Image: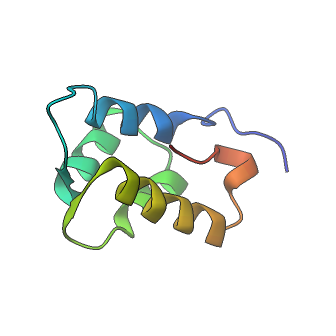
Amino acid sequence: MLQSDEFGSLQRVVDALYADPRIETVRRMDVLVMAEVYDLCSNLCDIVKLLPPGSYTRQKLCNQLNASITGHAWGLMYGTVE
């Protein structure tokens, strides 16, 4: 499987969400909105939509997103987040 043109797009979303060092947590809705702003492809939007409601530290958000990416075997195609 080759890297998609969207490789790293989800990382840019995560970086944007936590760009302000004062932000410790974001809500699921924040992630959904930022995914729309960054115009993620449908597969990555589906990954974001799988997030359960709640607040997320960066680490918790990355763990959730990476679990979904890995579960779909899309790590090589889209990359994981940190």
Q: Residue at x 39, y 53 (%)?
A: 59
Q: Residue at x 63, y 72 (%)?
A: 71
Instruction: Say left or right for 24 vs 3.
Output: left
The residue furthest top is 20
Type of colouring: rainbow
Instruction: Say left or right for 52 vs 4.
Output: left
Q: Residue at x 34, y 48 (%)?
A: 58
Q: Count the numbered circles shown.
A: 0
- The residue closer to the viewer here, 43 or 13, is 13
- The residue closer to the viewer here, 39 or 21, is 21
Instruction: Say left or right for 63 vs 4.
Output: left
Q: Where is residue 69 in the image (x, y as percent from the top left)?
A: 59, 61
Which image quadrant for residue 70? bottom right
Q: Is residue 81 above or below residue 55?
A: above
Q: Which residue is drawn at 64% across and 45% down?
A: 78
Which image quadrant for residue 35? top left
Q: Is residue 67 above or below residue 57?
A: below
Q: In this view, does 20 lie above or below 40?
A: above
The residue furthest left is 22
Which image quadrant for residue 39? top left
Q: Position of residue 18 (x, y in %)?
A: 28, 34
- The residue closer to the viewer here, 25 or 69, is 25
Q: Position of residue 79 (x, y in %)?
A: 64, 44
